[in-house]
Amino acid sequence: MVDNGFEDDIVNCLRVLEQGGVILYPTDTIWGLGCDALNEAAVDKIFRLKNRPAQKSVIILLADPRDILQYVAAPPPDIIDMVQHFDRPTTVIYENGLGFPENVVNEDGSVAIRIASDDFCRALIKRFRRPIVSTSANLSGTPAAAVFDEVLADLKNRADYVVRYRQTDNRKNAASRLIRISDEGEVTVIRD
């Protein structure tokens, strides 16, 4: 049986994302601010909401490991198998992003991508058919919001849509593990 609130949130998020807006939503790790990762103006809006320096990169969420092949130039040949075997949410920094606006790509050309494991995120990305930004729902330099109640009222008010799904879930998840994978497949752990 489908949860109508879940479906309503997906439909409302899709409308906002398609119009270049910002959503406040639960991810597979913490609460995040999101937008169309291919829309430069929408990404700029997130930077303004967070008072985040433009040179700091954002995380991109994809729904399926195969999508990496569309957005990363020359990933390691076994990247899909590697990503499918992660035992927890893991954001991977890849050396050469493809097709993203400048404000999504780091100064060195790298991009940070995580394959979403959360049902809501996966459904949203699959229905949107584009990658979405995921950045912590906080002001730059302040603690990330692990649960909805920790999100600042100002961010709740300034987001174009606030997802209702999981607002009462008080389980605290940690931010994702952060690793870098070179084009040759060499793995460096940045945050465990």
Image: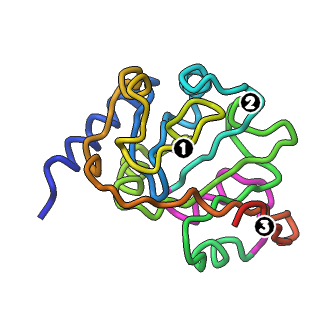
Q: Which residue is mark 3?
A: 189
What is the number of callouts on the image?
A: 3
Q: How is the image coloured?
A: rainbow
Residue type for callout 2? Glu
User: Does 134 sit above or below residue 88?
Assistant: above
On screen, residue 34 versus residue 184, left or right, reads left
Callout 2: SS: loop
Quarter of the image containing the N terminus?
bottom left
Residue situated in front as seen by the camera: 49 or 101: 49
Label 2 vs 1, first from the N-terminus: 2
Do the residues bearing badges 1 and 3 touch, measured as CB atoms within 8 Å? no
Q: Residue at x 85, y 63 (%)?
A: 182
Residue 125 point in image, percent of width and height:
43, 49
User: Does 44 sit above or below residue 170?
Assistant: above
Label 3 vs 2, first from the N-terminus: 2
> What is the distance, in whole Å, between disc 3 and disc 2 at their CAs?
25 Å
Q: Residue at x 20, y 41 (%)?
A: 8
Do the residues bearing badges 2 and 1 touch, measured as CB atoms within 8 Å? no
Residue 110 point in image, percent of width and height:
79, 47
On screen, residue 131 versus residue 149, left or right, reads right
Circle on res. 144: 1
Callout 1: SS: loop
Residue situated in front as seen by the camera: 168 or 98: 168
Q: Which residue is mark 2?
A: 102
Residue 141 point in image, percent of width and height:
66, 34
Label 1 vs 3, first from the N-terminus: 1
Q: Which stretch did the figure color magenta?
A: 63-77
